[in-house]
Amino acid sequence: MIVDMAKSSSQTSYICVVAISLFLGNLFLGAQARTVHYYDFVLREINVTRNCTVTTILVVNDSLPGPTIRVQKGDLVYVKVHNQGLYGVTLHWHGVKQPRNPWSDGPEYITQCVIPPGTNFTYEVNLTEEEGTVWWHAHNEWTRFTVHGAIVVLPREGSSLPFATPDGEHLIVLGSWYNEGTSLNKALEMEMSIGSPNVPRATGYLINGQYGDFVPCSNETTPHFFVDYGKTYLLRIVSAVVGTEMFFTIADHNLTVVGMDGAYTKPIVVSYLMIEPGQTLDVLVTANQSPGRYYMAAQRFATEDMDFTKFAHMVATAIIQYKGNYSLTSPPSFPIDTLPFYHDYSAAASFVQRLRSLATEEYPVDVPHNVTTRMFITASLNDLPCPDDSCYFGDSKIGTSLNNISWVDPSVDVLQAYYRNISGVYTADFPDFPPEMFNFTGDDLSTSLAEAAEGTSVKVLNYNETVEVVFQGTNLLEGSEYHPMHMHGYSFYVVGLGLGNFNNETDPQMYNLVDPPKVNTFGVPKRGWVAIRFRANNPGVWYWHCHIDRHMSWGMNTVFIVKNGDTEETSMRPPPSYMPPCIASKEDKLFGERDHNLKSDI
Ligand code: C2O
Ligand code: CU
C-alpha cells in the first residue's frame, strides 16, 4: 500500500502514502486513489524584527507565514500539532469541509478546547471537493495573526485545470502586524473585560510576512517574485489579514481571477482586487510588460465611518522582477493609477459584483432552488448591558450581534455538549428573524434599538434542509461596516447582494441561480445585504461568524448544528480517542496557572 515516501526540503516534514479508499458520503462519491500526507507543525515563539523593532511572535515551524500544505484534490492530511508555545491554541482548516467530522475543525469552544502547552493533537484534514487554494489558521482569540498558512489543492492525477496550465505559480499570503506580538491576546482580553471599543489595531499589513519597501528597516527583506517575459503565472492569494478588507494590485499588469475559496470562477480580467479576511483568490498574471521591476501593493479598504482615521494607512509591497539581462536603472514602478483609495466603495462593489462560478458541465452549480429554511439575520454593532457599572461606558459595553444576540463562549465546547447531551452549555433557540423590523440601514437610528442580549444560542437544522440566509447589515450606532461572513463545514452560493434594506418581494427576483459564486466567506456590504444558499448535507457542529476578529470577539457569531441523516454515511463520526480537555478559564489560559492537570476527562 505504501507507494511513495518523501521528506520535504522545507522545515515541514511529511510523508505520503497512497491508499485506495471508498467514500460513500454524498460530498464525494466513488472509489478513488487518494494520497495520505503527514505533516508536523511545531508551534513556538521566536523573535523577529519588523519596522525596526524586535518582537516575539508565535509561529509554526519557525516561519511567517507558516508551512504550505500541498495536496491533490481528495487527499487526506494528518497534521500533528506540537504546542511548544506558552498558551493553548487550536488550528482550523479554513475552507476544508471536513465531511461528518467537526472534531477536526478547530474553533475554540465550538468544536474543541485548546491544545495545552507541552502537548500535541493530531488533526485529520479531509479534502473532498475543494480545488484551488484554501488555508489554515489558529482559531483561538487572535492567535492567527502569526499562525497561518496556505493549503494548495491541485487537480487530481489525470485531470487538468479549467484554464491553460500556467508556466509557474507564486503564493501570496496577506497578513497584518500587531506590535503586541505574543501579548496580543492579553491586550485584547484586558480591553474585552471592560467592554472597551479600544481593542488592539493592526500597525500595518504584510505580504508573505514582510512590510516591503515603504516601511522603515524593511526594504532588505521585501519579497521578490521572479518572472520570465511572456510567461503566465498563477498567483494564489490568501487573506490572513485579521481585521480588514484589502485592495491589491500590480503595477501595469492585468489580473485574471480564475478561482476563489477553493472553487473555480469564470475568468474575469481586472486591474485590482478587493479581498476580504478569510478569502482566497486564484489569479493569473502574464509577464507581458517591458522587462523591469513592478510593485505589487496591498492596502486597506476601510469601511468604518469615514471620520474614523486611526487605521494603518501604510501600503504593503512586494516586487515582481523580470529575469534576464537589462539594467535596473529606475525604482520599480508603483501602481499609482490602479490601487483604489481606502474608502473606494464603488471599486469594491464593482469587483465583487463580477464574481461568478465557473458553472460548466465538469464544474456544475447545484444551488438549491426550493428553500426549506429561510432566515433573515441582522449583523450589528450594539450596546450590551453591564449590570455592575464596571464597564468602559459605565452601565454598558460594546458588542456585536446576529439577530440581536451577542455570542458568549461556553466553557465546554458546543460539539462535546451536543454529542454527549450535556445541558446548560448552549440553547437551541437562535431566531430566524430579528426581534424588530426597522429601517436597518438608515441614519440616526434610536439607540434603544442597539440594545442586544448575550447568549450561547445556536440554530439546529435537519439533515439535507435547503437553507437561505439573508444577512442584513445595520447602521446602529452609526456602526455599519463590511462583515465578511464565514461558514465552517460548507461552501455556500451567493445568490444576491445589494445596498439598503433587503426587499423580500423584489430582491429575490434578481437572484442569480445560474452561476452564483461558491465561497466560504463573503462580505455583507456596508449598509447593505447579501443572500446565500446551501444544502445542509454535512452533519455536525459548524461555526459561522464575521471573519473580522474584532467583530467576532464582540459576539458576531453563532453555530449551525446539522442533525444526522438516517444512515451512517449521513451521520456525524464519533470523536477520536483523545480531544484536548476543557479545563482552563480564559483568565487562566492567558494570565498564568500553568500546572493544570492536563489529562483529558472525556
Ligand atoms: Cu477562517 Cu472560523 O475561520
Ligand atoms: Cu464584521
Image (cartoon, rainbow, N blue to C red):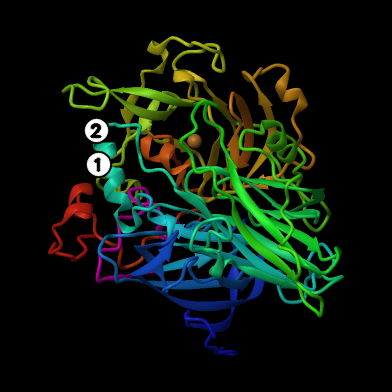
Q: Is 453 within the magenta? A: no
For disc 2, the neighbor class at 10 Å (few under 14, some 14 to 19, many from 20) is some
Q: Is residue 403 visible?
A: yes
Is residue 384 positioned above or below 366 on the image?
above
Q: Is residue 457 left or right of residue 254?
A: left
**Amino acid tagged 2:** Ile
- Where are the magenta residues, as a range? 101-122
Whether ligand 2 has any atom under 8 Å from the Cβ at mark 2 is answered as no
Nearest to the observer: residue 530 or residue 281? 281
Q: Is residue 460 left or right of residue 325?
A: left
Helix, strand or loop under label 2: loop
Instruction: Write down the residue under mark 2.
Output: 194
Percent across and percent down for residue 175 are 52, 55
Instruction: Write down the residue under mark 1.
Output: 190
Residue drawn at (59%, 89%) of the image: 4
Percent across and percent down for residue 445 are 48, 11
Q: Is residue 398 left or right of residue 350?
A: left
Q: Quadrant of residue 342?
A: top right
Residue drawn at (75%, 55%) of the image: 251
